[in-house]
Amino acid sequence: MSKPKPPSGMTAKEYRHMTTQTLGLSAVRSDIAAIFAVAVIGLGIVFAAGHAQASALHDAAHDVRHATGFPCH
């Protein structure tokens, strides 16, 4: 794979610096988006588990065990 050529009027060093900065910014945005998504999912799980009745959680876990073929009794 050949290296891309810088646009006219720009040195190779300037082009390399520009593309490195752009890639760094998109990586940071991607990391922030991933952290935000995990936080929302985690808070949703904590909220749902905290407000559900214990018997409902037990029954749901029990049904999942049966559905996956895990021997539970």
Image: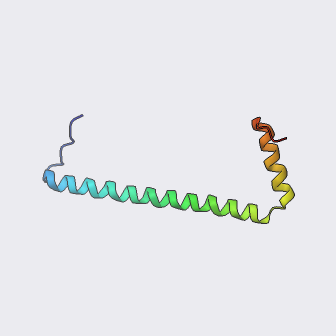
Q: Quadrant of the C terminus?
A: top right
Name the quadrant containing residue 71.
top right
Closer to us: 58 or 35: 58
Closer to us: 49 or 72: 72
Q: Residue at x 74, y 61 (%)?
A: 48
Q: Position of residue 69 (x, y in %)?
A: 77, 35
Q: Residue furthest front?
A: 73
Q: What's the image's color scheme? A: rainbow
Total numbered badges shown on the rendered structure: 0
Q: Residue at x 75, y 61 (%)?
A: 49
Q: Relative to 50, is 5 above or below?
A: above
Q: Position of residue 15 (x, y in %)?
A: 19, 53
Closer to us: 19 or 42: 42
Q: Residue at x 69, y 63 (%)?
A: 46
41 left or right, relative to 56 = left
Q: Residue at x 35, y 59 (%)?
A: 25
46 left or right, relative to 20 = right
Q: Position of residue 6 (x, y in %)?
A: 18, 48
14 left or right, relative to 38 = left
Q: Quadrant of the N terminus?
A: top left
43 left or right, relative to 18 = right
Q: Position of residue 67 (x, y in %)?
A: 78, 38
Name the quadrant containing residue 52.
bottom right
